[in-house]
Image (cartoon, rainbow, N blue to C red):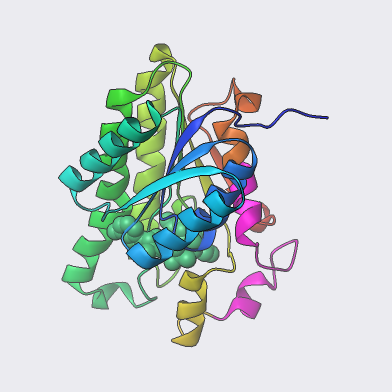
Amino acid sequence: MSESLLRDRVVFVTGAGSGIGRAAAQLFAEEGAAIFAIDRDEQSLDQVVGHIVSAGGRAGGQACDVARLNDVADAVNAAVSKFGRIDGAFNNAGIAPPAVDTSLVDPLLWQKAFDINVAGIWHCLRAELTVMEPGGSIVNTASVAGMAGLPGSALYSATKHAVVGLTRSVAAEYGPRGIRVNAIAPGLTRTAMVAALIENGDMDPEALVAHSPLRRMAEPREIGEAALWLLSNRSSFVTGHVLAVDGGELAV
Ligand SMILES: NC(=O)c1ccc[n+]([C@@H]2O[C@H](COP(=O)([O-])OP(=O)(O)OC[C@H]3O[C@@H](n4cnc5c(N)ncnc54)[C@H](O)[C@@H]3O)[C@@H](O)[C@H]2O)c1
C-alpha cells in the first residue's frame, strides 16, 4: 500500500471554504495533512473544518480576508500555535471580476482584484516564509489566464500573470533556503465562481471548452490533485514551475 503523500505535514489553505480550496483541503487531509483553513466566509469555513474533523482528520481555521496584511499574519500565527509549524501552503483564495471591455473596467474593481489576487498571495507568502523551515513547499493558484491573454479579462489576466511572477521570483529567492514555490494554472473548473459568471451571462462554458482537447470543465478535486503533488515530496526537484491543469487548453 502506498504511503499518504502529506503524512504528518501541516498545510495552510486559503479560500478553503469553496470550490478548488475546499476540495483541496479535503484531499490534503485524506492524504494525512493537518489543515489550517482560511476563508473570509466564516460559515463555509466552519463547514469544511467540520467535514474534515468528522471524517477523522485534523483541521482548524480562522476567518480572514487575505487582502488584509495583519489579519493574514495573525492567521499564520494561529496555525503555528495550533499545530506547531507550517510545512506547506496552498495560497488559493481569489476572485474573478466579470468580463468587460478593458476601457470600461471600474478602477475600484481593478484595485480590489489586485488587493485580493496579488497582494493577498504576497501577504500569505510574507507570513509563511517567516515561519517555514527548509523542506517547506508553497503552491499559489494562478490560472490559464496567467499564462495567456483573454479578451475581456485584462484585469483578471493581469492579476494572475502577477501571481506567476511572484511565484518564480520567490522560488529563485528561497530555493537556496530549501523552500520550494510553485503555481498551478487551472483551466475552467466547476466551482461557485464559474457558476456565478455563467449565471450573469459573463461566460459561455460550452464555447470555452469546445476547442479544449478534453472538451470539458475540471472538477475541483482534479485541480487539488496537482496541488497535492506539488506540496508533497514526490515533486522534490520542482520549483518555480507553473503547472497548467487545463485539459490541454493551452496546448492548442
Ligand atoms: N474555477 C475556475 O475555473 C478557476 C480557473 C482558474 C483559476 N481559478 C482560481 O482558483 C482559485 C479558487 O477559485 P474557485 O473557482 O474555487 O472559486 P470559489 O469562489 O468557489 O472559491 C473561492 C473561495 O475563496 C474565498 N475568498 C475570496 N476572496 C477572499 C479573500 N479576500 N479572503 C479570503 N477568502 C477569500 C471565497 O469566500 C471562496 O470560499 C481562485 O484564485 C481563482 O482565481 C479558478
Residue 218 lies left or right of residue 239; in this view the side is right
Where is residue 126? Give x, y as percent.
Answer: 26, 33
* Residue lying at the far top of the rendered structure: 176
Q: Nearer the viewer, residue 196 or 2?
A: 2
Where is 22 relative to 151, above or below?
above
Where is residue 16? Give x, y as percent.
Answer: 44, 55
Range covered by the magenta-colored residues = 204-226
Residue 95 in sight here? no
Q: Residue at x 25, y 44 (%)?
A: 72
Task: Specify the quadrant of the image occupied by residue 8.
Answer: top right
Where is 73 relative to 130, above or below?
below
* Residue lying at the far right of the rendered structure: 1
Q: Nearer the viewer, residue 151 or 213?
A: 213
Q: Is residue 217 magenta?
A: yes
Where is residue 117? Give x, y as percent.
Answer: 32, 54
Q: Residue at x 21, y 74 (%)?
A: 106
Tell me the quadrant of ligand 1: bottom left
Q: Residue at x 22, y 39 (%)?
A: 73
Where is residue 197? Give x, y as percent.
Answer: 46, 78
